[in-house]
Image: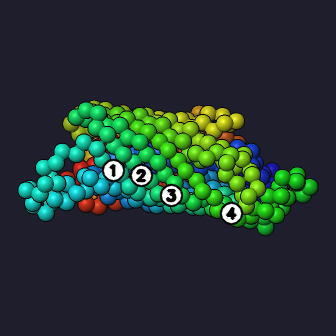
Amino acid sequence: MSMKKVFISVVFSLVLIVSVKGQELPKFSQFYRSMMIINPSVTGIDDYLDIKLGYKDQWSGIDGSPRTFFASFNANLNSLKNSYALHTGNPNNPVVKTKVLNKNGLGFYFFSDMYGPAKQTMFMINYAQHYRLSQKVFFSLGIAAGINNLIFDEKLLSVKDFDPYYNDFILNARSTYYFDASAGASIYGDRFYLGYSVNHLLGDKASFNDNPYGDFFKMHHNFFAGLNLKASSQVKILPGLMIRYINGTPLEFDLSLRARFKDFFVLGASLKDGQVIGGTVGIILNNYVNFSYSYDYSFSKLKYYNKGTHEIILGINLMNFKKEPSKFVW
């Protein structure tokens, strides 16, 4: 099969994913590093300003393959007040003496997802409440709301004798904005986390220019779990799991296993949907800056036509006066 035919097949498959499977949100290889985008209840989970920038190039080497960029920002407002008061050397500040039972998290994120003739851009604002259940265990609830824009460039795809659904879409919905929302809940401590979230919360109530296209906005149900196991005084073992379900599609799952050495170097492996294996490396510098890279290799038929999937994430932890790594979602 020629590369031109491969390209057409890939793009056509991507269009089918959009129209049949639903407008699926991007799924990052390092889901544990971009959790706030999928589950708003982790917003403000750490005691500092958490900034992340990420880029994913899926099926590298194929024109029109998915490419995703994201930027996120979130903070625990209560903990920041305490940390700042301690850092400025004012122990008599009443904020310092107050034991924070509940925490408020606030943040936002932006991402741009491009695949074939389609481009999705989203901006969301997150808010979460964290409730202390015990000395080391918390329960959190979070919501996210914002704007999603979908653009379809028919010039990048040549289709003959396509069905009326496609023609109606081109005439009425090449570019449109719609309101989107997510919600989630988590229970977590310094040794484990469990979470559940729903994306595209409005489901088929979304519309394109007053024309209903419910299949584009099926709800995403996400389940998360992770452990922080202490192998030695210098090594931590971090297994993680993410399961995603979208009505009418096969169940998706990601399994990851990482080792963190001296809170400085991270090495890991992953298995996705039973047909993609991956590796991850990362470094942590003074708990202020962290960087990670992952590579995924697929055993599907596309393996003959692409160079794998690359993902990089840069994290910056501002006002991390305690100089601590993330305690909860690793």
Image depth: mark 1 or mark 4 in front: 1
x 38%, y 41%: residue: 140
Give whichever of discs 4 and 3 has the lower sequence position. Answer: 3
Circle 4 SS class: strand
Label 1 and label 3: CA atoms lie apart by 17 Å
- Amino acid type at circle 1 is Asn
The mark nearer the N terminus, 1 or 3, is: 1
Residue at 44 percent across and 39 percent down: it is: 185
State the image coordinates of residue 199 (x, y, percent, origin top left). 56, 45
Tell me, yes or no, whether the two marked residues, 4 and 3, touch with CB atoms within 8 Å: no
Closer-to-camera residue (252/211): 211
Q: Is residue 240 visible?
A: no
- Per the image, the residue denoted by label 2 is 127
Q: Residue 176 shows which numbered tag?
A: 4
Amino acid type shown at disc 3: Met
Q: Which residue is mark 1?
A: 104
